[in-house]
Image (cartoon, helix red, strand yellow):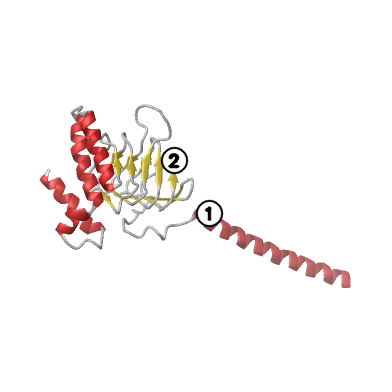
Amino acid sequence: MIKYLKEDIEVVFDQDPAARSYWEVILTYSGLHAIWAHRIAHWLYKRKFYFLARAISQLSRFLTGIEIHPGAKIGRRFFIDHGMGVVIGETCEIGDNVTIYQGVTLGGTGKEKGKRHPTIKDNVLVATGAKVLGSITIGENSKIGAGSVVLKNVPPNSTVVGIPGRIVIQDGIKVKKDLNHRDLPDPILDYCKTLEKEIAQLKLDMERLKQERGLESAD
């Protein structure tokens, strides 16, 4: 347990350049508080102390603004940056070295029973405001762009952007896990740019045809 607590603190220094001291992290980081409260609640939940587990979960939600169901399975070195508005559902499974930002929802899509929340594999980054919904899997080393809504499985080493989420394959190359989740590819914008180029070329071709016909009429 002490080893895991130390890892939870160290990952804050790895991921947040604003972290200055251990005491600052321990006393003021709500994401860290929510993770520690969840580890206690999950321990109780596995031993069928459901009410007590939910009570701790709700107290943590009140104090931190982060709601993690005690049934969720969370791996090592999990980092929640800022965290306000984060929701993690009961049957979520989160691997190691995962980072999520404020406003993220790892939720279900209805009232179905059984596995109804996402599985997030190792080394995944889920950016601000993203929604990952349903019993889907986000593969290792992937990024979910800010504001995206993901409803389908995502293969490893991928980047997802847009509503609904669209996958941009990175040619099998591991996606670098860093804090820059603004400069992500936008497939819709790329498609619009392609259409603009095609329209511009069509206009040039039409002008050329008009000039050729004008010359033929003059002759």
Secondary structure beneath disc 2? Answer: loop
Is 171 on the left-hand or right-hand side of 48?
A: right
Q: Is residue 68 above or below residue 206?
A: above
Tell me, yes or no, if residue 10 can be seen here: no
The disc placed on residue 188 is 1
Is 4 on the left-hand or right-hand side of 124?
A: left
* Tag 1 near tag 2, CB within 8 Å: no
Is 55 on the left-hand or right-hand side of 166?
A: left
> Which residue is more in the foreground, 50 or 12?
50
Query: Can you tell which quarter of the image residue 216 is in?
Result: bottom right
Tell me, yes or no, if residue 116 can be seen here: yes
Tag 2: residue type? Leu
> Which residue is tagged 2?
151
Task: Compare marks 1 and 2 and give the one earlier in the sequence.
Answer: 2
Q: Is residue 120 above or below residue 219?
A: above
Q: Residue at x 25, y 62 (%)?
A: 18
The disc placed on residue 219 is none
> Which residue is more in the foreground, 1 or 22?
22
Quadrant location of the N terminus? top left
Q: Is residue 160 above or below residue 207?
A: above
Q: Residue at x 26, y 59 (%)?
A: 16
Q: Which residue lies most toward the left here? A: 2
> Which residue is more in the foreground, 27 or 98?
27
Q: Position of residue 94 (x, y in %)?
A: 28, 41
Q: Residue at x 40, y 48 (%)?
A: 130
Query: Can you tell which quarter of the image residue 54 is in?
Result: top left
Tag 1: residue type? Ile
Quadrant location of the C terminus? bottom right
Query: Can you tell which quarter of the image residue 136 is in?
Result: top left
Q: Residue at x 18, y 54 (%)?
A: 27
Q: Position of residue 138 (x, y in %)?
A: 36, 43
